[in-house]
Image: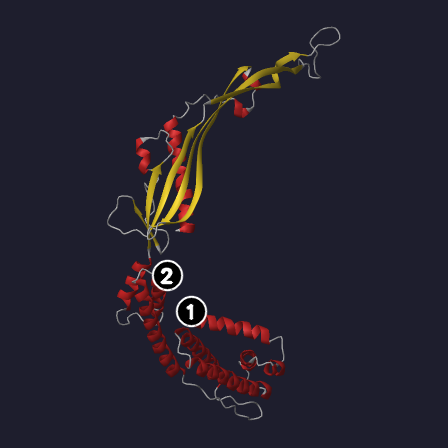
Amino acid sequence: MKTLKLLALLTVTLLIGSCQSVEKMMDNGNYDQVIALAHKRLSGKKNKKEKYVRALETAFAKSVQRDMDRIGMLRNNGRASDWEKIITLAESIEMKQRRIQPFLPLIDREGYRANFKFVKTGEILAIAEDAVLVELYQEGNALLEQGRLNDKLSARKAYRAFDKIFDYTDLYFDVIDLRKEAKELGINHVRIVQENASGDWMPSYLAGLLTQDFPVSDGFWTRFTFDGDSTVHADLEARIIITNVDVGTESLRQETIERTKRIEDGWDYVLDERGNVAKDSLGNDIREKRFIRVRANVIRTHQEKAGYVSAEMRITDLKDGHVIMSVPINSEARFYHMGQTFSGDRRALRSRERRFIGMQPFPSDEDLIIDAAQGLKPLFIKELKENA
């Protein structure tokens, strides 16, 4: 992955460098751009221009020296993050050396032989990686000690420190067990509780409806447990308190829509001025279409009924009883149906109106309450994700 990033960086450097002169890039200290441009100008050329050979020689030396100076400075700090920067710098040097290697020996068309002093990056990488592992391991253990004192943030930082070790090796002392412990200590266990404080009638089995098929976790650091489960020590309590339950009255509303249409209704003979049936040039009787206007009334019946459940969601820190947040949430379940029939001539109706749609029975109060209560669940989960 790091190699791909370095290649992408060199590609961008080359694109930028092609728009500037070698001298200007060198003056500005853009040595990596000079290396990329010179590499392009020298690739595949038998007679290599002195300008680019010397530019590559100088830019390489200056770029590597700058990276090595930076590595020397970072070594003195001794932090894991600084050792990681050293690894990145060493890999950058190695990438530049690999780009130059195919040119060697590099001789211009005048016979000048460029001199390149390569760095043993393998030694730097080995030292840096060992130092990173030591620093991450020590950092993780120090943070884990705080995590064992119920500092969940430190436990999570410890997990991340141990996890970074696996970027370098699959086996390092007891880091697998330590990472597992840090993860467990960093998890927030949230107890879900449902309470009916509305004083209104509710179906007996609604008590567990909101926790039924509830997800067992939310991401990496949150696990849910449920009221009555004594096997898990909860850190937080997420309580959903039903404060109001209501069902609206059944509503019926009718409307009548008149439809008229001019339609073909058979035919009539055409008569001449004497009252006889007119003939065409072939002697056939002449007929014409007969049209009439038909009418019908469409009677539409709109059925509506709604159920409402209001609640308060409250998250409490169980260590000290502090209420972290409290927010109202509301849900509505609405039934709507449109039935229709008609009177009059069916032919006057529009095509979609020719299908008779009858009435439907209204849902019971209990069904609407259940549907509205189920609508609270995604709102409850959303608030949990944002606040737990």
Kindly report the distance in space between the C-alpha atoms of the residues bearing marks 1 and 2: 29 Å
Between label 1 and label 2, give the one nearer the viewer: 2
Which residue is under mark 1? 1
Pick the residue in front: 275 or 76: 76
Residue found 46% across the figure and 83% down from its top: 68
Q: Look at label 2 and name its amino acid.
A: Leu
Residue found 30% across the figure and 51% down from its top: 234
Residue 362 shows in this picture? yes
Q: How many marks?
A: 2
Query: Would residue 115 be found to the left or right of residue 125 on screen?
Result: right
Q: Look at label 1 and name its amino acid.
A: Met
Quadrant location, the N terminus: bottom left
SS label for mark 2:
helix
Which residue is under mark 2? 153
Task: Work out whether 270 lies above or below 211.
Answer: above
Image x and y of residue 298, in percent: 55, 19
Q: Quadrant of residue 374?
A: top left
Image x and y of residue 127, in percent: 36, 81
Task: Work out whether 235 lies above or below 103.
Answer: above
SS label for mark 1:
loop
The circle drawn on residue 241 is none
Q: Earlier in the sequence, mark 1 or mark 2?
A: 1
